[in-house]
Amino acid sequence: MYLSTQKRFAIFVALVLATFVVGFLLLSMVFHMESAWPWAVLISILAAPLFYMRVFQLSYVKWKDSYYVGVEEIDYDHKQVVGMINQVVTASQDHLAENIVPGILDKLIDYTKYHLDREEKLMEQYGYPGKEQHAIQHAKFIGKINRFYSKYSEERNMKNQEVFDFLRCWLLKHISNTDKDLGAFIQAKRNAQGEA
């Protein structure tokens, strides 16, 4: 979910104020301090950056065992895509996004086309019955990522959070909704043919 700068600032201010109030109450009640204000202010100042990093910074996509589809080639490709998504996070954290993200998107588009082509060849090779529907989803995604890239190129002020959310959501949805079924089918075929 993308939050505008104003919303992010409002949430940040609310967190700082909440920290101040909680710090003041804790110091007043627990330590019976009559003048807890300076300590509450100090706690708020120290806690504010931690809250900001926790709430607003992008976090890396961590590869989970649940992402495996059971086909080595497909799993390898998915890990490569996760790596590219995480490059967006790194670029954002290092404040290099404006220069680096377009290159990452170019690389991602090329690799995605390669990956989807590889999946379609595997579907053809093993006679996957959902090949046509899966290929339609691939074509829709290529169109979507091309439109997204055009929008990113035109609107240089597009936030990296939007780029990250778009890529992460697509990858996880793609793996869980379409590639799991394909992986199970190919595994069964390979096992039956003694390829595993």
Image (cartoon, rainbow, N blue to C red):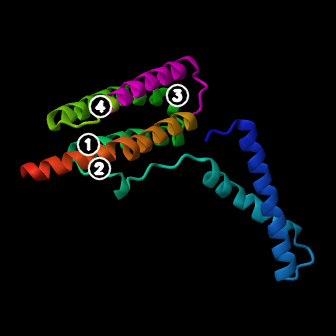
Res 74 label:
1
The disc labelled 4 sits on which kind of residue? Leu
Number of labels in the image equals 4
Residue 168, how many percent across, how many down? 47, 41
Q: Residue at point 59% right, 32% down? A: 159
- Look at the image and give the residue range highlighted in magenta: 134-159
Q: Residue at point 55% right, 46% down? A: 58
Res 98 label:
3
CA separation in Å, label 1 and label 2: 7 Å
Are dots 1 and 3 in contact, CB under 8 Å?
A: no
Q: Which secondary structure lies at badge 4?
A: helix
Q: Which residue is mark 4?
A: 116
Q: Residue at point 49% right, 20% down? A: 147
Residue 100, how many percent across, how many down? 45, 30
The disc labelled 1 sits on which kind of residue? Ile
CA separation in Å, label 1 and label 4: 9 Å
Among the two numbered marks 2 and 3 on one chain, the one whose residue lies closer to the N terminus: 2
Residue 177, how many percent across, how many down? 40, 44
Up/down of 140 relative to 181, above or below: above
In the foreground, 150 or 43:
150
Q: Nearer the viewer, mark 4 or mark 3?
A: 4
In the foreground, 26 or 189:
189
Are dots 1 and 2 in contact, CB under 8 Å?
A: yes
Residue 39, how many percent across, how many down? 82, 69
Q: Which residue is mark 2?
A: 69
| Visible residue check, residue 46 | yes
In the foreground, 136 or 174:
136
- The answer to if 138 sits in the magenta stretch is yes
In the foreground, 135 or 62:
135
Q: Residues within 10 Å of mark 3 (few under 14, many from 20)?
A: some
